[in-house]
Image (spheres, grey):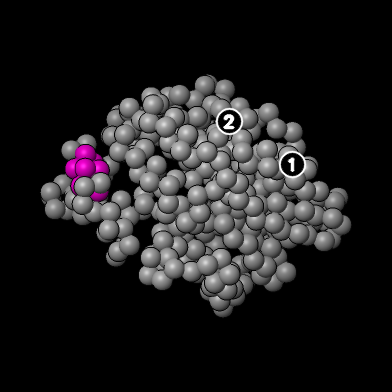
Amino acid sequence: MKYAIISDIHGNAPALLSVLEDARNEKVDGYIFAGDYYADFPYPNEVVDTMRNLDNSFIVSGNKEGYLVELKEIDQTDWVHNQFNSLYWNYKKLRKENLLYLQQLQDKAVIEINDGTIKILLLHDITNLIKDSNLNLLSSSKYAEKMERKPFNDKEFAEYIEEILHTDETIMNEVHNIDADIIVFGHSHVQWHTTINNKILINSGSCGLPLDYKCTAAYTIVDIIDSKITIEERRVAYDIDRLVKEIKSSELYECAKGWCDIIIGELNTGRDDITFFFHHAWEVARELQNTAWPFDNDIWAEAVRSWFEESKTKFSTLP
Ligand SMILES: [Fe+2]
């Protein structure tokens, strides 16, 4: 069985369609989706409709779908804060059946292959399962800090992964205790895989918004023939210039311009700017002595304005 593992689409339908075309050319038998299907691009229904029409697919929720579940319970006046405009636009734009579909997704799944002789554990964020470990060093913001300090290539990153994961006893023990042969996840938007204690860990990266300094849609193919498992990380180029034009002429852009501009920056660089933008926004909030959370709209507006006017160079300095 050959599966395409796809994660963190974030509403980027053009990236998803390009990945699915590549996966069909690779003759995959099915699809594994690891969460975060909407949020930052103007195509939430196109993404969900496409996923729902695929045969032989396994789908779990991500933290973005978690917001949709929370919204059922909470006072939505909080969502008029401009910092949430992109999420809230998407929430309102999702057709009812697609909203319900995303809200009912489970956060974990076990996929049994070859009559249960191979088990795949699927979840969005492995750091929810293995806490306080070196896995936190593989986040997109840590990746950006490391890259800005001293650029590295894929081979050096693979060596770094071996070094930090294989020397971490928490990870070695926790992975040993997981009842699965392959553990599949996403969340960090950084693509990697490794083998620990005979178990394969696969982060398929991000289809819609990669943050590993590559501006191509990421996904990973796992091919299982009897007990032989082969992993192939794939990157698919698509028309980002056209996507940016579409974003800029969308309703979403009108509603959440600052957020969209940061996302466009990430699309064009593959770099995690959002984490550094929030760090900058907190600095602005402290300077203006208004640290209310969510940010008041005037703090948010000043943070966006000053981010684009003066602070692009600040992004590599997290505390
Ligand atoms: Fe994500």
Seen in the picture, residue 201 relative to 298 is either above or below; the reply is below
Based on the picture, tell me whether residue 305 belongs to the magenta stretch: yes
User: Position of 138 compared to 289: left or right?
Assistant: right
Kindly identify which numbered label has been placed on residue 25: 1
Q: SS for tag 2?
A: helix
User: Image quadrant of residue 25?
Assistant: top right
For the residues carrying marks 2 and 1, which lies nearer the camera in this image?
A: 1
Where is residue 214 shown, x and y percent of the image?
A: 51, 54
Kindly identify which numbered label has been placed on residue 48: 2
The answer to which of 289 and 161 lies nearer the viewer is 161
In this view, the residue farthest toward the left is 288
Tell me how far mark 2 sits from mark 1, CA to CA: 22 Å
What residue is at 70 percent from the left and 65 percent from the top? Answer: 199
What residue is at 61 percent from the left and 27 percent from the top? Answer: 49
The answer to which of 82 and 27 lies nearer the viewer is 27
Where is residue 114 shown, x and y percent of the image?
A: 85, 51
Q: Earlier in the sequence, mark 2 or mark 1?
A: 1
Where is residue 182 shown, x and y percent of the image?
A: 70, 58
Based on the picture, tell me whether residue 126 belongs to the magenta stretch: no
Mark 1 surroundings: few (<14), some (14-19) or many (≥20) residues within 10 A: few
Region rendered in magenta:
299-307
